[in-house]
Amino acid sequence: MAHDDEQTTLAAAEGSDASQLQSHKEPLLPTSGKADAKQLISRAHPFLKKDRLEAGPNQFKVRLFGGYVSDIIDGVMVRAEGKQLKEWCEKFKWPSATRWRCAAFGEEHCHYFARELADKGQFYFEQWRRAGSPADFVYSEEQVFAHEEGSTFRYFMFTEDVRSTSFAAGLAVRRFRPEPMVYRAD
């Protein structure tokens, strides 16, 4: 029954008519083997953009995990890909891979966390790369606080109950900063 409800929702979103849906009983994803990435993208939460899976080298990429046997996504992950980016992560104490389980936070919230952490990491990495990737680079307070949260993440944090585990996970994402960082002495 839940599968039919999901198909109805997808059909409505795509503008299909209900009579076509009644005859369509294929599963949304293959029931054996690995699901094709494009199929996962097509049913993934709208906040996961296709370009995250097809970005070039030295990028933080958002990945889905699960969905191999059924259409249920187990979690969402952010991973640093590319040698230079992984070296940057090690040097500035940034996680090279972080994941959130949908069972703990819900699929939508996992996407919020992953996208914000990926965007934030990419922002700081690009600052370092634009400076010429120096070995002795130290982030200034201004550079660190120049990053602005995405509007979707900001809205989520504003509307989420402060006692929820999702809010606590959002605060953890919000607190990520590259180290070392120079603080101004006032």
Image (tube, rainbow, N blue to C red):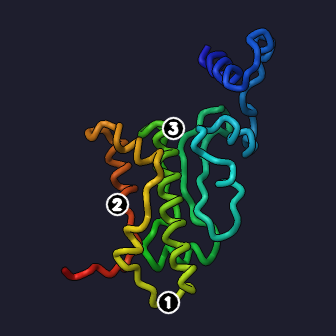
Give amino acid for label 3: Glu
Query: What element does badge 2 sit on?
Result: helix
What residue is at 60 percent from the left and 45 percent from the top? 48
Few, some or many residues within 10 Å of mark 1 (<14, 14–19, 20+): few
**Mark 2 residue type:** Arg
| 3 vs 2, front mark | 2
The location of residue 15, given as percent across then percent down, is 73, 21
Q: Nearer the viewer, residue 152 or 105?
A: 152
Q: Amino acid at mark 1?
A: Ala
The residue positioned 70% from the left and 65% from the top of the image is 56
The percent coordinates of residue 100 (x first, y second) are 47, 48
Q: Which residue is mark 2?
A: 175
- The mark that comes first in sequence, 1 or 3, is 3
Q: Which mark is residue 135?
A: 1
Residue topped by disc 3: 107
Could you tell me residue 185's position as x and y percent? 21, 82
Q: Are marks 1 and 3 in contact (CB under 8 Å)?
A: no
Q: CA distance from mark 1 to mark 3?
A: 38 Å
Tag 3 secondary structure: helix
Q: Residue at x 34, y 38 (%)?
A: 160
Determine the secondary structure under disc 1.
loop
Badge 2 local density, few (<14 within 10 Å), some, or many (20+)? few
- Distance from disc 3 to disc 2, alpha carbons, whole Å, reads 21 Å
Q: Is residue 150 above or below residue 146?
A: above
Q: Quadrant of the N terminus?
A: top right
Q: Is residue 113 left or right of residue 6?
A: left
Residue 30 figure quarter: top right
Q: Is residue 74 left or right of residue 16?
A: left
Quarter of the figure that contains the C terminus:
bottom left
